[in-house]
Image (cartoon, rainbow, N blue to C red):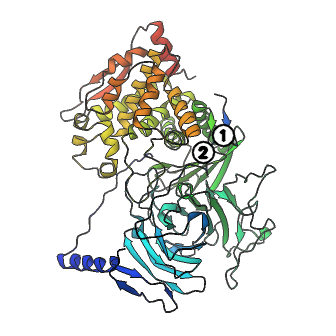
Amino acid sequence: MNIKFRPVTKASRYGLLTLTVILLFYASVTSATLTGCSAGGKLSVTTGSPAPTVLPASAGSPAPAGSTASASFPAPAGSPASAPADLMINYRISMDDAVNHNFRVTMTIDGVSADTLVLKMPVWTPGYYWIQNYPKNLSRQEIRDAAGRECHFLKSSKNIWKVATGGAGSLTASWIVYGNSHSVADAFIDTTHAFIVPAALFLYPEDAIKSPSRVTLDLYPGWTTVSTGLEPVTGSDGLEPVTTAAGREKAINSAGNKPVTNAAGIVKATTTVRKPVTADSGVAPAQRLEQTFSASCYDVLFDSPVLAGNQEVMTFTVNTVPHHIAVLNPGSYDREALKRDYARVVESAVSIIGEMPYSHYTFLIMGQGMGGLEHLNSMAVFTGREDGDIYPADRRSFRGWMEFIAHEFFHLYNIKTIRPIALGPFDYDRENYTNMLWVSEGFTVYYENIIMNRAGFMTRDEMLESLSRSISAYESIPGSRVQSATLSSFDTWINFFSFSENSQNTTISYYDKGCGLGLLLDLKIRQSSGNSKSLDDVMRTLYYDYHKKLGRGFTDGEFRAECEKAAGTDLGELFGWASSTVRPDYDRYLDYAGLYLKEEAPPAPGGRARFVIMKKEKMTPEQELIFKDLFRQVN
C-alpha cells in the first residue's frame, strides 16, 4: 500500500433517547429465532434462542495468481452452515443505475443443505489496514428460494446475517451497494466508469472462504472494457451483448459458457477484455455488454479489483507474460516509450526474486483520488489528477511516479507471497494484527529505490537522497523516541488513518523506519558475508522456502533467523532497534559502504532537523565493493 493522504473522519452523535431505542431494538432482534421461508415475505420469529533465471512460475508451483492459500473460520455455536464443497456460488453485478452510484448485486447459491445459512460481508480489504465497515453502504437486501418465496433473515452483527433456508437447496440474495468514493479501498460507480473492490460489494457464506465463485459484470450502456486480475470464463473476445427478453437471457457466443483454454488446457490469461461498440460488431450502442470471471476462492476474489468503462489499455510482455496498463483519461505521450519503461521496472523487480508468481498482470490506473494498493496480480493506483498522465515528461515527476509503480509492483512479492504469517489467510471480520509491517511496507520502500536504480531510472546520488528523506522523516520528529517500528506496525489499525496535530509527537511511520532499518540490515548482511550475501538472498529464501515449499508465511522469529543465517552472525542489536526507540548506530552500519549520516540543524526555530547520507572521500576496497554493488552506476 502507498497512501499519500490521511482522511478526516467525523463521529456521528446520537441523543440518549435515540441510543436507548436502538439498543433495545437490537437486543430484541438478536434474541429471535428464524422460522423459514414463506410466500408472504413477513418476518416470523420466536423468542428465547441465541443468535536467478527469471521464469514464470512453473505449472506445479504454488501461488500463481488464483491459487493463494486461504482459510475458513469456524461458524458461531448454534449456526450450522452448508458444507463449502457443496456450494456453487454465482454473482451478477448490474451497473444500470450508475447515475445514482448504485451497484445492483445478485448472488445465487446452489447446494444449500442446512436449515440456517450464515452470510457475511468483509469489514476491510487486504492491504488497507483500516476497518471500512462495508455493510454501511448496503441496502435493499432480499433473499428468496428457487420458487421465489422470500426467506427470513436476521442481522446478528454489523456484517453477519442468519438466513432461514426452510430446506431450500437454492437461494438468491440481492442487494444494492452505494459506491461514490475515490479510494483504492472502496467502490465507485458513475456513468463514466466503475471501480469494484470485491470486499466492498459481496456477501459470502460463512465457512465457504475456500469455495470458488463466478462473477458476471453487466456493464453500463456504452462501456466496452473490463480490466482485472480475475480469470475470464466466457469466449475469446470476452464481452457479450445482454438481451432484454424475459428472464434476461444471455446471448451465448460460439464458445458457449466454457473457459477459454489453450492447447494445454490452461485458461487463457486475457484479463482486459473489450469489444468495440460499432455497427460491425453487431452490438448497438444502447445495448449492455457483460463478461464473466472466476475466482478459485474468496481470498482471490477479495484481492482482485475490477475497472470497467472505456479505459485505454496498453499491453507489453516480459518473459512472454502479458502485462496490461489500463488507464482512464490517458494523456498525450509516447505509448511505446511508456510500455518500454514500465517493462524495465517489472524486469528490475522480477530479477530480485527470479520468478514471476503470475500468468498475467494488470495496472489499474485512475485519476481523481490518492494512493495505491497492491493485489495478487494487479495494482490499483490514482494519479491524483483528472487526466491520466502516467508518463510525466519532467524527470523528477517521472521518477516519483515510477517509484510509486515500483513500490506497488514489488508488493506482489513482499506481502503477497513473502508475508508475515498473520497476513493470510485473512479474517475479514476484524483487524489482523502483525508486528511486521516495518518489513512488509518499509522494506518495500527500500526496494523501490533498488528497483529504480537497477532499472536505470535513479542515480546513486538520487538513491542516497531518497533514503535520506526516509530517515529524516522519523528521526526528525519526537515520535521516534516514543513509538517503535514494531508497535507502529501493530497499531496501524488505530493510528495510520487517524492522523492529528499530535501524531508526530507520539507515532512514527513504519514505512519510513522500515526503509531505514532495511538499509542497515542489507549493509550488515553484506559486510558480514564479504558481500557474498545481501537482503536479496533473505527475500528469495522467504519466497522459495516459505511461500512455495511450505505454502505459508513466516513468523517474526523465522524472519530474524533467516536474516541471521544470511549474515552468519547474531543480529540482536538491529532487531532491538526495530522493537525499541533506541536510535540506531547509523554511522557504524553506513560505514560498511563508506557512508556516514550528517545531521543538519533546522533551517528555522521550530523546524525539523535534516539527516543526509554522505559519501566518504576515501573508501577501503571492502567499502567500495559494497557501495558499488548496492548503489549502481547509471549512465
Decide: is 384 above or below 134.
Answer: above
Decide: is 134 above or below 478.
Answer: below
Give percent across and percent down for residue 348: 59, 32
Q: Which residue lies under the disc numbered 2?
A: 63
| Residue 137 visible (yes or no) | yes
Give percent across and percent down for residue 382: 49, 52
Q: CA distance from mark 1 to mark 2?
A: 8 Å
| Residue 178 visible (yes or no) | no
Give percent across and percent down for residue 107: 56, 72
At 69% from the left edge and 73% from the top edge, which residue is drawn?
285
Q: In the image, is 457 to the left or to the right of 587?
A: right
Q: Residues within 10 Å of mark 2 (few under 14, many from 20)?
A: some
Q: Are marks 1 and 2 in contact (CB under 8 Å)?
A: yes
At 52% from the left edge and 59% from the top edge, which residue is drawn?
209
Give percent across and percent down for residue 40: 49, 92
**Which residue is at the front of the view, 594 or 395?**
594
Q: Which residue lies under the disc numbered 1?
A: 57
Under tag 2, what secondary structure?
loop
Under tag 1, what secondary structure?
loop
As shown in the figure, which amino acid type bears the numbered disc 2?
A: Ala
**Which residue is at the front of the view, 275 or 76?**
76
At 34% from the left edge and 16% from the top edge, which residue is drawn?
588
| Residue furthest bottom as drawn | 40
